[in-house]
Image: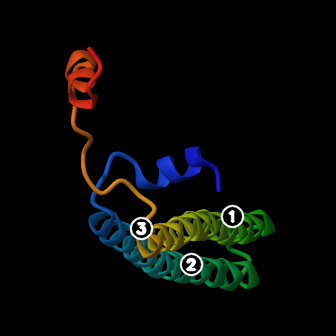
Amino acid sequence: MKDKNIKKIIGKDKNIDQKIENTEDEIQDLHDEVIKKRESFLEDYSEGLKKKETIKKELHQDNATGVKLDEAKDNLQQMRKGAIEKVEKIAEQTKEKKRGLKILKELKENGNYIKKDPILRMDQQIKKDIGCN
């Protein structure tokens, strides 16, 4: 694992427990977003199907053209495609968050992270502390 990736995952947080908790919350938020997108899609798609059926009935009664029906079908296809793309994007974000969470937990388990903020001291103070003048 490259240090750059670890730094990216940990970020500026020095408290790894808090970072793990935040990452778990972010993953849950992504799961909730998928559920909301699914519910929204189902509502919109249901309306689209109703419109398509209405157009079919009108077509059989010679009150509509085949173009309207084709447009309704295309609209439903675009809705499906859009919903799939959105969910795939969220799934990829979730996958990345889970990878990061796994690394954070491994770092915590191994104790391989910065536990405290560094103490800032001047060069002269460090030299004095180690006995160099």
The mark nearer the N terminus, 3 or 2, is: 2
Q: Residues within 10 Å of mark 3 (few under 14, many from 20)?
A: few
Q: Quadrant of residue 123?
A: top left
Check disc 1 and give the amino acid type.
Answer: Gln
Query: What SS does tag 2 mark?
Result: helix
Q: Distance of mark 3 from mark 1, alpha carbons?
A: 49 Å
The residue at the point 29 percent across, 20 percent down is 132
Residue 78 image label = 1
x 49%, y 48%: residue: 8
Residue bearing mark 3: 111
Q: Which mark is residue 126?
A: none
Provide the residue designation for mark 2. Answer: 45
The image shows residue 118, relative to residue 24, as above or below, that is: above
Please, what is the three-letter code of the amino acid marked with disc 3?
A: Gly
Nearer to us of marks 3 and 1 is 3
80 to the left or right of 122: right
Which is closer to the viewer, label 3 or label 2?
A: 3
| Classed neighbour count for the residue bearing mark 1: other residues with Cα under 10 Å, few (<14), some (14–19), many (≥20) | few
Q: Quadrant of residue 113?
A: bottom left
The local secondary structure at tag 3 comes to loop
Distance between the alpha carbons at the discs numbered 3 and 2: 50 Å
Q: Nearer the viewer, residue 61 or 16?
A: 16
Q: Where is residue 35 drawn, in percent x and y?
A: 45, 81
Mark 1–mark 2 Cα distance, whole angstroms, equals 10 Å
Query: Mark 1 or 2 closer to N-term?
Result: 2
Residue 40: where, in percent of width, then height?
45, 75
